[in-house]
Image (cartoon, rainbow, N blue to C red):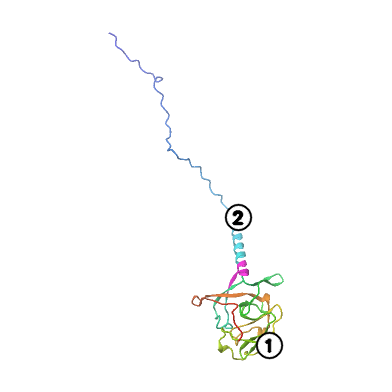
Amino acid sequence: MEENKTPDMTPEDQAPEQPETEEKAEGTVEEAPQEKPEKKSLGREILEWVVTIVAAVAIALVIRTFIFEPVRVDGQSMDDTLADGEIMIVSKLGYSSFDFIGGRVSAFGNPKRFDVVICRYPGRGYTNFVKRVVGLPGDTVSVQDGYLYINDEKYDEPYINDDYRSGYLNNFAPFTVPDGQYFVMGDHRNNSNDSRSIGPIDRNMIVGHVVQVVFPFSSFRSIPNGLNVKAQ
């Protein structure tokens, strides 16, 4: 009896092997190759620094010219309102003046009587002085026995220490303030170089008005301006 023999399978008859495929998780995205950041040149970095510094200086200049600036009190001429060494904030918002080509220019606004202001004197360059405006254009100002008179009316200034009313400066003959000028005096009337000796000052010599003492911190306080000081 013949045996049933299974014919041998040739390699051609075997199922072809499937190539291996790389499995990928659903929802994944292939990352693009990262580009290296462009390296700045030394010249570009220097230019960027210069632009930044110039912009900062310009902003600071605008703030100091038109908004505010800190100023240090030097001397006793404004005792007891302001003390030597105190640092105050001077506002330029109400009125201001600034240096420009050919001289100083009044920016806007005008001081009020009894404002505490930062000003400059003729022939004293950029030196700042802190004084109180007591005479407006057209006012006639005088001091009699230590008391201020404006247009023949006596003013009992509450911010003046009575000890400062006596002395060699306790009298000043009547003086009429010219148009466009202001008469300023220190609150320490016997220890102040002011309009009684240097004369009235032009409007463009007034830099701004004092609004706040900020240092030392223990003396932090507001400085009233345009006081409602009434004649007696």
Give x and y (percent) for residue 83.
Answer: 54, 81
Amino acid found under the numbered disc labelled 2: Arg
Is residue 66 one of those drawn in magenta?
Answer: yes
Above or below, 128 against 155 in this view is above
Residue reaching furthest top? 1
Image point (60%, 64%), residue name: 59
What residue is pinned by disc 1?
174
Question: What residue range appears in magenta?
Answer: 61-70
Image point (57%, 88%), residue name: 164
Q: Secondary structure at mark 1?
A: strand
- With 214 as the anchor, is 10 left or right in this view? left
Magenta: main secondary structure: helix
Image depth: mark 2 or mark 1 in front: 1
Give x and y (percent) for residue 144.
Answer: 63, 90
Q: CA distance from mark 2 to mark 1?
A: 66 Å
What residue is pinned by disc 2?
44
- How many residues crowd around disc 1 within 10 Å: few (fewer than 14), some, or many (20 or more)? some
Q: Quadrant of residue 157?
A: bottom right
Give x and y (percent) for residue 85.
Answer: 54, 79
**The N terminus is located in which quarter?**
top left
Residue 150 or 38: which is nearer the viewer?
150
- How many residues crowd around disc 2 within 10 Å: few (fewer than 14), some, or many (20 or more)? few
Q: Which mark is residue 80?
A: none
Residue reaching furthest left? 1
N-terminal label among 2 and 1: 2
Amino acid found under the numbered disc labelled 1: Pro
Residue 135 or 15: which is nearer the viewer?
135
Above or below, 5 against 133 in this view is above
Q: Are marks 2 and 1 in contact (CB under 8 Å)?
A: no
Is residue 226 one of those drawn in magenta?
Answer: no
